[in-house]
Image (tube, rainbow, N blue to C red):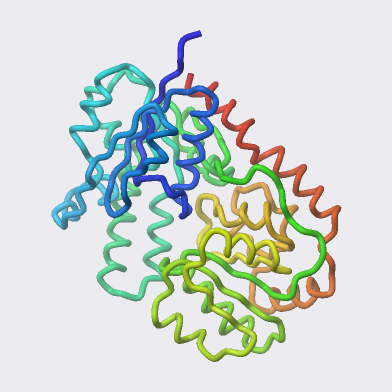
Amino acid sequence: MPDLHLHIIAFDIPYPANYGGVIDVFYKARELSEKGVKVHLHSFQYGRKPSAVMKKLFHEVHYYKRDISKRQLIKSQPYIVSSRISEALVQNLLKDNYPILMEGLHTCALLEDPRLDGRKRIVRTHNIEHEYYQNLAKVETDIFRKYYFYNEASKLKRYEKILKKADLILAISKHDATYFSKRYNNVEFVPAFHPFKIVTCKPGKGDYVLYHGNLSVAENANAARFLLNEVFDNLNVPLKVAGLSPSSMLINQFANRKNIELIPNPDNKTLHDLIENAHINIAVTAQRTGLKLKLLNTLYNGRFCLVNDKMLSGSELDDLCIIANNKESIKRKIKTLFKEEFLPENVEERIGKLGALYNNGNNVEHLIELVG
């Protein structure tokens, strides 16, 4: 049987896989490579450095400078697309006839290029992008950034029709699969790829609640403030908030608060220990988009998982979480859960459910069938 070769076009350098967008990209590519697929990885570069790890893992690795100049803002294409157009990339793709997997609408300018007509072209959708940008606009306080997000959302809504040219669309959640299936043919649900191989939750009790996320993202910073000011304002339970790059304003808001601790920029081991030892991992979001990979992290490695329903959107993981959608309900659930132990039966339930739906090994076999 001949080798299967696959071009993967990444919107960013996917290693280290330390933020939501690139986690699926990296672990999907790694699983494919471990199954013998010859992965030709192409990454747009704008801040992250080339990676020796990727050079060892993949058949070929190429980098292209992303053009983040302001002139890209005035184009009719969305900025996330126009800033990722590369003739060097097209020339590399024209050297063979292998299938092309485009990560996100970000890299879909390739669907517009007639030189690639006739090639098998697959798009991995990470979000319903215009909805994602509308929600970013709603929570943004800076007037210029708010305008940019609204403008980008309207461009993305128009541009999304380019997906009609794709041979296959791989949706990351059931919610997204339903949305895309109403508009395009050949939509398949392929769950997010992730670093977790086994469920490591510890039965028993912890003595704090943990919220974690990239705190430079407005949505996550707002969630941290909501917990600080609305939920833990009069709750006699310790809260720890951990995450990347909190603003000085956020740091000041957490200063001198009894029973509340902010842990900026934890390394992977520190974050894993925080998740594992918490009694409750809490995850709330204002956005019903994509799949929140931090949800998988807490379900594989933590005890009770308390979420709002938007966090679960299309994940099929409702059975494994406790759901609360407003501050009063969240407070009640926290008080109740602190009287309970996390049991071995809870761990077994997670092993069964996560193994059935989010098993990288099964999902990569399905992906290979679709791509081959």
Horizontal side, residue 21 vs residue 69: left or right: right
How many numbered callouts? 0
Viewer can see residue 121: no
Where residue 14 appears, as percent x and y from the top left, is 40, 45
Q: Which of 140 and 32 is in front in this view?
A: 32
Q: Which residue lies furthest to the left in this view?
A: 71
Q: In this view, does 50 lie above or below 335?
A: above
x and y, in percent, of residue 232 in the image = 64, 83
Q: Can residue 330 be seen in this view?
A: yes
Q: Quadrant of residue 365?
A: top right
**What residue do we see at 51% from left, 40% from top?**
27
Query: Who is closer to the viewer here, 77 or 48?
Result: 48
Q: Which residue is drawn at 44% across and 33% down?
A: 57
Relative height, residue 160 to residue 248 (above, below): above
Position of 54 with respect to 93 (left or right) is right
Q: Residue at point 40% right, 64% down? A: 136
Rendered residue at 43%/23% (across/down): 38
Left of 33 or right of it: where is 356? Answer: right
Please tell me whether residue 107 is drawn above or below residue 334 in the rendered image.
above
Residue 78: x %, y % from top left: 27, 49
User: What is the residue that sits farthest to the top in this orientation?
Assistant: 1
Percent x, y of residue 224: 53, 75
